[in-house]
Image (cartoon, helix red, strand yellow):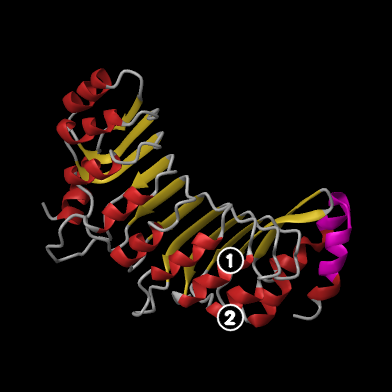
């Protein structure tokens, strides 16, 4: 791995046209980079099989603004190795073994604006998402996605402390409908996407997102955009959103709702763009299996 180090420093100092030959060095560790104005701007990598050496290498790309890592083995110590990336504005991580305490290492990125976390720590039974509360120390963070986690209400309770958020997206976690109530605390939220809890195949697990959940969103007056997915909803529930003074768009997809109800919604909220994608037969069947209804 040491052979990459001289290439790394050469890459950061060279103009874009001269940096191209060194792309191969990163391809050898399953990483792709983009260079702007002679500096490495973004990196995306499949981190399966990475050792500390690869993270130490990436940690020296101090000009990075965007980082995307996919793999199951990123741990607390390895995230800490990236703490020198002070210019990061966007991070996407798909799969980790971070503990809740390990989330404190995200606070090393003071310019972080967008954090997307998919399928986190599914190997760790102790992980419950409460570590997301560490993110309240990041005042620039305004967008968070948390999806595919075996974590639920504790995670949403932590999200409720992130009052700086303007955008929050969540689906396929293990929250209950009661956990969604923590989102009411996000009074700066402009955009939200709600999806269904992680499917519990073979079990009669109550839906986390249903008609009753809409009343929660109706208590967040800052909302401008609402996306509703993977639920059975009715006109009487969704129309509650009309009380939101700043609402501009409602997106309804993979939702069991009648066309007649959608047309009534459009009439009831003439100043709001209502985008609806009808369920396909395949989606309807899958939704029924997920909800066991």
For mark 2, does the 10 Å Cα neighbourhood hold few (<14), some (14 to 19), or many (20 or more) residues? few
> Which residues fall within the magenta stretch?
7-20
Residue tagged 2: 77
Numbered disc 1: secondary structure: helix
Front: mark 1 or 2: 1
Quarter in which the N terminus is drawn = bottom right
Whichever of callouts 1 and 2 sits on the residue coming sooner in the sequence is 2
Q: Which residue is drawn at 57% across and 54% down?
A: 139
What secondary structure do most residues of the magenta stretch adopt?
helix
Relative placement, left or right, of 152 versus 187 is left
Q: Where is residue 157 in the image (x, y as percent from the top left)?
A: 34, 62
Which residue in the protein does label 1 denote? Answer: 107
Q: Residue 37, percent across and down?
A: 83, 48
Q: Which mark is residue 89?
A: none
Camera sees residue 282: no
Picture quadrant where residue 78 is located: bottom right
Instruction: Name the one closer to the observer, 128 or 197.
Output: 128
Question: In the rendered image, is residue 36 in sight?
Answer: yes
Percent coordinates x, y for residue 48 in the rendering: 55, 74
Q: In which quarter of the image is residue 255?
A: top left
Check disc 2 and report its element: helix, strand or loop. Answer: helix
- In the image, 118 versus 224, the foreground residue is 224
């Amino acid at each position: 791995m040491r052979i990459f180090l001289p290439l790394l420093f050469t890459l950061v100092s060279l103009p874009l046209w001269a940096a191209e030959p060194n792309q191969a060095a990163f391809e050898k560790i399953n990483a792709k980079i983009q260079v702007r104005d002679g500096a490495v701007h973004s990196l995306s990598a499949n981190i399966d099989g990475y050792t500390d050496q690869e993270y130490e290498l990436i940690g020296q790309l101090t000009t990075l603004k965007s980082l995307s890592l996919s793999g199951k083995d990123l741990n607390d110590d390895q995230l800490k190795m990236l703490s020198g990336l002070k210019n990061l504005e966007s991070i996407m991580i798909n799969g980790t073994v971070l503990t809740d305490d390990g989330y404190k290492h995200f606070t090393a990125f003071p310019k972080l604006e967008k954090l997307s976390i998919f399928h986190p720590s599914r190997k760790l039974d102790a992980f419950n998402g409460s570590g997301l509360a560490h993110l309240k120390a990041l005042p620039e963070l305004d967008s968070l996605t948390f999806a595919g986690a075996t974590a639920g209400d504790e995670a949403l309770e932590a999200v409720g402390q992130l009052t700086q958020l303007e955008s929050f997206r969540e689906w396929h976690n293990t929250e209950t409908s009661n956990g969604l109530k923590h989102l009411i605390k996000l009074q700066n939220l402009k955009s939200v996407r709600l999806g269904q809890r992680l499917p519990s195949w073979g079990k009669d697990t109550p839906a986390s997102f249903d008609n009753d959940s809409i009343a929660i969103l109706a208590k967040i007056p800052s909302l401008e955009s609402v996306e509703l997915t993977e639920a059975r909803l009715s006109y009487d529930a969704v129309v509650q959103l009309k009380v939101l003074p700043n609402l501009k768009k409602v997106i309804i997809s993979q939702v069991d709702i009648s066309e007649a109800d959608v047309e009534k919604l459009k009439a009831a909220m003439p100043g709001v763009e209502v985008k609806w994608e009808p369920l396909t037969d395949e989606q309807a069947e899958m939704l029924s299996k997920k909800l066991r209804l």
